[in-house]
Image: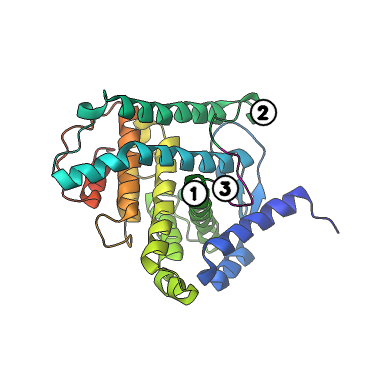
Amino acid sequence: MAESGEEEFARDAVQLLRAAVPERLSEIDEIIALAGFREGRDGPGFKFENVYGQVIFTHRSVMQVYLISFLAWRALRAYSGLIILLLATREPFDLSKVAHLPEQAAADEAVDGLAKGLTEIRKAFATLDVPWPADIPAPSLVKHANVEDQAAQEVSLLALAFILLHEIHHVVLASKGEASGDWAEEHKCDEFARQMMLRDVDHYAVSCGDNPFMVRSKRAMAIALANAIYAEITPQKLWAGSDHPPIADRCFANYEDWPADPNAPPWIYMSSVLAAQLRRRNRDVNAIAFTSARDLCEKLTELTR
Ligand SMILES: [Zn+2]
């Protein structure tokens, strides 16, 4: 019998989790026995909701996760070279000193253009009203020819897994009568998703013949992207906290278990993403002395308060 669109949507979500953290299959099956996924009606915004034992989300939200991953990649292109250079020369990170350079201005413009396209997609009455952003390849089931596009897509799928794990933990807590509905619950759901993705990652990488540092780095980048998405969809006046905890508090908690090397890729990635977000929201990102990419990342995180 052919599957309905709804069954297919739910099955794809479970498949995504199983592919994202293959070392935690038994726990995923336990969770799925308690809670499920369902496609919600399309509408403006970024929607992941928990209703009656189900995580409900829209195709438009999935598209935003994908596009924000490409946005993050543009931020990485705009700032990673600068961060590495400044680490070598031991100079402070100072956007006011580089913003006028033609290459930097073009890289910043590429970030701003896609950010504007994303805002339009989020606000549109119907997604069909909005053109697909220029220069962004459509999601692909086969590998993208461009390695950066492929990396951005892979990180977006892992970030989506993180978000789904976070949301489904709300449902599981509710089913056990343990949902407190406050900031503490949000932190618990982040912690659950983070542990699912990072706790057994070294063992898993070794069992596949992969480099544990690389696999941990990639998953940490996905957690960085999930944090970037929370910041991206949250109006700046609510960064300091609303029904969700402050962006900075969630970020700091989610840095746990990232690679110990303070200049590992996730620290450069998150620094780049934060620098772009702070610049776009007209915060001063000037004269920040730093000793490592992690140090810069933590200082930029503080600036989101
Ligand atoms: Zn939540």
Please report the bounds of the magenta region as a residue range. 137-145
Q: Which residue is mark 3?
A: 144
Magenta-drawn stretch contains 139: yes
Q: SS for tag 1?
A: helix
Residue type indicated by callout 3: His
Q: Indicate which disc residue 39 carries.
A: none
Mark whose residue sits in front, 2 or 3? 3
Mark whose residue sits in front, 1 or 2? 1
160 or 132: which is nearer to us? Answer: 132
Residue type indicated by callout 1: Val
Q: Residue at x 45, y 50 (%)?
A: 181
59 or 31: which is nearer to us? Answer: 59
Examine the rendering and report whether any part of residue 246 can be seen.
no
Q: Is mark 3 within 8 Å of ligand 1?
A: no
Q: Indicate which disc residue 128 carries.
A: 2
Residue type indicated by callout 2: Leu
**Residue 46 vertical position relative to residue 96 in the rendered view, above or below:** below
Magenta-drawn stretch contains 39: no
Within 10 angstroms of label 3, few (less than 14), some, or many (20 or more) residues? some
Q: Residue at x 58, y 70 (%)?
A: 30
Q: Is mark 2 within 8 Å of ligand 1?
A: no
